Amino acid sequence: MPTTSPVSLSGRSVLVTGAAGGLGSRITRLLADAGARLTLVGRDESALQAMGIDGATTVAVDLSTPDGPARAVEAAVAAHGGLAGIVHAAGVVAFGAVHEVDDDTVDELFLINALAPLRLLRAAHEPLTATARADGDAFVVTISGVVAEKPTAHMAAYSASKAASWALAAAASGELRRAKVRVLDARPPHTETGLATRPVAGKAPSLPEGLAADDVAARIVRAVVEGERDLPTTAFAAG
């Protein structure tokens, strides 16, 4: 349920992973427009710099490594004196039946889609709870997507990695509720971010036209501001 009053993002330190991606870049710009002090995380420093977000800290890091998420959190705290929110918009996709997906592909899917948000939560626990004690609210957003609710044939490994992300968010939400840290999972339907054209393995099947990335990004940021704690697929279908 939403909180009783909107959450201000102005002047608050927010870390965004996948910040130069198809969805992450749109979320980043909306957060910047709302006055957030941003730490932008991705593998490509030049892509982060090219976004031209005034005052943003950029961190080129591989989130699939054991220390990558902690390095991102440390950079945000060092640059902005604390951390009020995280948006984990980094993600990878793979296509293919279970017997076709090799171990390296499965590892990459789970390292980015499931283990990275877990490691981010672990690394950010102290600064997030400190902010929540001071301000009354802090937040973490994960984006597991529709396949977490509706696992899809020929995307089994990808679906499983995203379902793990959803389970993590649901359990962590209960753990952190008393500390006033919201863990919000978003499960939008297929969205036109271009991710399906860049799989780490396999080839995308024929997909129906997805939602506009701008609309999905706006819905996620609105949920943060309005204090929501879950965004199921139906929250996007309803507009």
Image (tube, grey):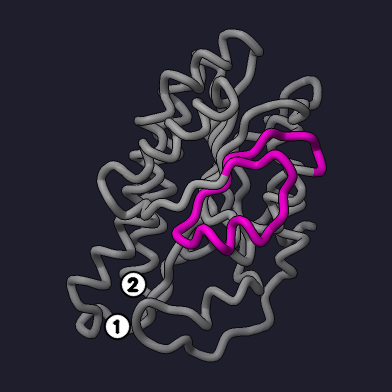
Q: Is residue 191 magenta?
A: no
At which x and y percent is residue 6?
Answer: 80, 26
Q: Is residue 48 magenta?
A: yes
Q: What residue sits right under mark 2 in the picture? A: 156
Quadrant where the image shows the C terminus: bottom right
Look at the picture and state if 237 lies above or below 96. Answer: above
Residue nearer the viewer, 106 or 189: 106
Quadrant where the image shows the N terminus: top right
Q: Residue at x 71, y 65 (%)?
A: 213
For mark 2, give the secondary structure: helix
Residue 35: name its quadrant: top right
For mark 1, give the secondary structure: loop
> Going by the image, does 196 lie left or right of 102?
right
Q: Is residue 131 visible?
A: yes
Q: Residue at x 41, y 24 (%)?
A: 125
Magenta segment boundaries in residue numbering: 33-57
Q: What residue sits right under mark 1 in the picture? A: 97
Q: Residue at x 63, y 19 (%)?
A: 137
Type of amino acid under label 1 = Ala
